[in-house]
Amino acid sequence: MTKQEVLEQLKKLGLLAVIRGPSPELTIKMVDALIEGGVTGIEITYSTPNAEEVVRKLAQKYKDQILLGMGTLTKPEQVDSAKAAGATFLVSPICEPGIVRAMVGSGLLVMAGALTPTEIFQAYSLGSDVVKVFPGSLGGPAYIKAIKGPFPYIPVMPTGGVSESNVKEWFAAGVIAVGAGSELCPPALAKEGKFNEISLRAAAFVRTVNQARTELG
């Protein structure tokens, strides 16, 4: 997929599962369970053991059936290896110019992390296609609404503090998608082998996202 196609798919899905898996094997099972529940936007973080190998296996298994990317990039050299593994988008929790420029140079969809107005503007100015507002829990939807005042043209996606109970508030504030981690896919459930529960959580989260966007028009 082209970068623009990935962006359109992200907007269409409205939801990314941000996965910090406990092991490569359990991470793949977590993703299988999420997909079973209808969550097809998958971000494997570099804090997952053997993250690149996990992405490689998922890319081979699901191909274009899912939107697969890598997150928690903190080193420029991770950009090429993430792309080689099969990532179609790259996410960093920070706005460090060297990392963002390397991400942009990959030709993949880029989501750099930022929090303050200055950081958000800087991330977008450096070429980030979407700005990951992190941690979203610090300001909440009200903060996003305030940010969209001076920056209505900057696509934003919050991660951290996103739950089923507040999804509608985030979209009402103007985000293009939300990133959900432990609220959507707790590693503890994977360790306990409760993959059916992960699928049920995923299905409920997708329903909530779709309903919220439908109601908001």
Image: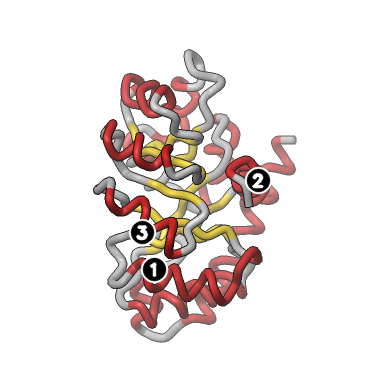
Q: Is residue 7 above or below residue 131?
A: below
- Residue at 38 percent across and 28 percent down: it is 123
Q: Is residue 90 above or below residue 149?
A: below
Which quadrant holds residue 192? bottom left
- Residue position marked by numbered label 2 in the rendering: 5
Relative side of 27 to 130, left or right: left
Q: Secondary structure at mark 3?
A: helix
Color theme of the render: secondary structure
Q: Residues within 10 Å of mark 3 (few under 14, many from 20)?
A: few
- Residue at 45 percent across and 71 percent down: it is 56
Instruction: Give residue 122's position: percent from left, percent from top.
Output: 35, 23
Relative side of 51 to 170, left or right: left
- Residue position marked by numbered label 3 in the rendering: 81
Q: Are marks 3 and 2 in contact (CB under 8 Å)?
A: no
Instruction: Give residue 184's position: percent from left, percent from top.
Output: 47, 62
| Among the two numbered marks 3 and 1 on one chain, the one whose residue lies closer to the N terminus | 3
Relative side of 189 to 99, left or right: right
Q: Is residue 193 above or below residue 88?
A: below
In the foreground, 144 or 123: 123
Q: Are marks 2 and 1 in contact (CB under 8 Å)?
A: no
Relative side of 178 to 92, left or right: right
| Among the two numbered marks 3 and 2 on one chain, the one whose residue lies closer to the N terminus | 2
